[in-house]
Image: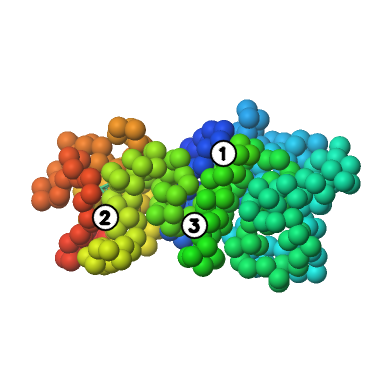
């Protein structure tokens, strides 16, 4: 008998639009598919299905060197690890000057130098730091160099993949504020990928929450963080430690990790969801507008009329605001959902 082919669905049914001068936070735990989205946008992977458009052009159908060069000048990437993102034998000016020479050949040598100093200033570094080697800088300074390198090509969109997750907590806010100033002063849009939903509040105009490759909630940052509709968004927020509120230190998470290999129909969060009903195992919830947000949840959308297993299940349709998730300790195993 032939073994069944295993197919991992890293991201499914995902629809994302980023406007000019907008910071969109893509939030989710490890394995949710957020870095896959960034790599698809950076053309590291081709999508198996679907299309990605940049300014009306399908990016995976760009073939000529000229078209690819254009795209790489419009969309730049900043990587997670500021310690391995630079070649240690070169000064940090190397990457900036190289990007300027490649993408802006109209600049003279003196103009390139002035532009390198300008982009360093834009990210909060002084011009004399251009002469330093990576090992002479802190993690926060190196991450700023990463943004300066991206900025040198004059991008319209920066893909920032967990840019502060490897930095000390004390310097994260400075880098996040720098990202906000790039949006305001340089006019770039940023896709900010993070597992830390609390940090989205600092910079993001919009938040998109991913779970197991599905978008579960999306909307304006303040609305999503103050009035989360999806149980997973609530769970993420309940895990944010607040030293002023002792009871919030206890995470309410239980259940199994998501299954993204050969996934079947149904909500991928159902094994961890305290509100799951029978329909959740049969029908995949689609993003539905609720106020100014999009939420993929049958119960939050009130789409439970034809379900015979709602009795005894707490309703989150009426009031999810501010409610903490408290899963039942005797929650049925996955096979019963
Ligand atoms: Fe998914 Fe159902 Fe829970 Fe909503 S109630 S998150 S659809 S399992």
**Could you tell which of marks 1 and 2 lies nearer the N-terminus?**
1
- Label 2 C-beta lies within 8 Å of the nearest ligand 1 atom: yes
Q: Which of the two residues, 206 or 97, is positioned nearer the viewer here? A: 97
**Could you say where residue 295 lies in the image, as x and y percent from the top left?**
33, 40
Using the image as rendered, state which of residue 243 and residue 85 is in the foreground: 243
Which marked residue is nearer to the observer: mark 3 or mark 2?
3
Which label number is shown at residue 173? 3
Q: Residues within 10 Å of mark 1 (few under 14, many from 20)?
A: few
Sequence-wise first label, 3 or 2: 3
Q: CA distance from mark 1 to mark 2?
A: 39 Å
Lateral position of residue 115 relative to residue 10, left or right: right
Single out the mark in the foreground, 1 or 2. Answer: 1
**N-terminal label among 3 and 1:** 3
* Any part of residue 260 in sight: no
Q: Can you tell me whether the CB of the residue at mark 3 lies under 8 Å from the nearest atom of ligand 1?
A: no
Q: Is residue 287 above or below residue 46?
A: above
**Rendered view: 113 above or below 94:** above
* Residue lying at 56% horizontally and 44% vertically, measured from the top left: 181
Can residue 205 be seen in this snapshot? yes
| Residue bearing mark 2 | 273
**Extreme residue in the bottom direction:** 135
In the rendered image, which residue does mark 1 sit on? 184
Residue visible at 80% across and 46% down in the picture: 114
Identified at 49% across, 43% down, the residue is 24
Q: Secondary structure at mark 1?
A: helix
Which quarter of the rendering shows the C terminus? bottom left
Give the Cα separation between the discs numbered 3 and 1: 17 Å
| Element under disc 3 | helix
């Amino acid at each position: 008998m032939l073994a069944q082919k295993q197919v991992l669905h890293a991201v499914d049914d995902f629809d994302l639009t980023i406007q000019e001068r907008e910071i969109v936070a893509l939030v989710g735990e490890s394995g949710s598919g957020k870095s896959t989205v960034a790599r698809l946008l950076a053309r590291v992977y081709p999508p198996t299905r679907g299309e990605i458009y940049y300014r009306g052009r399908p990016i995976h159908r760009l073939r000529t060197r000229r078209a690819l060069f254009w795209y790489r000048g419009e969309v730049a990437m900043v990587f997670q690890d500021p310690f391995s993102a630079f070649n240690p034998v070169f000064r940090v000016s190397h990457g900036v000057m190289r990007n300027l020479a490649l993408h802006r050949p109209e600049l003279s040598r003196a103009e390139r130098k002035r532009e390198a100093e300008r982009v360093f200033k834009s990210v909060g570094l002084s011009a004399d730091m251009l002469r330093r080697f990576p090992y002479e800088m802190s993690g926060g300074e190196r991450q700023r160099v990463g943004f300066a390198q991206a900025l040198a090509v004059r991008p319209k969109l920066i893909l920032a993949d967990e840019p502060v997750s490897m930095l000390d907590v004390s310097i994260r806010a400075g880098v996040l504020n720098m990202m906000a100033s790039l949006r305001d002063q340089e006019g770039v849009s940023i896709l900010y990928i993070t597992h830390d939903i609390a940090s989205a509040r600092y910079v993001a105009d919009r938040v998109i929450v991913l779970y197991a490759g599905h978008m579960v909630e999306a909307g304006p940052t303040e609305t999503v963080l103050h009035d989360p509709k999806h149980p997973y968004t609530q769970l993420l927020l309940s895990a944010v430690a607040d030293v002023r509120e002792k009871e919030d230190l206890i995470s309410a998470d239980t259940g199994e990790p998501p299954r993204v290999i050969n996934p079947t129909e149904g909500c991928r969060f159902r094994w961890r969801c305290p509100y799951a009903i029978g329909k959740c195992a049969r029908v995949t919830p689609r993003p539905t507008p609720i106020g100014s947000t999009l939420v993929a949840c049958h119960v939050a959308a009130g789409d439970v009329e034809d379900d015979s297993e709602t009795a005894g299940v707490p309703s989150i349709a009426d009031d999810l605001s501010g409610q903490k998730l408290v899963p039942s300790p005797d929650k049925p195993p996955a096979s019963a959902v």
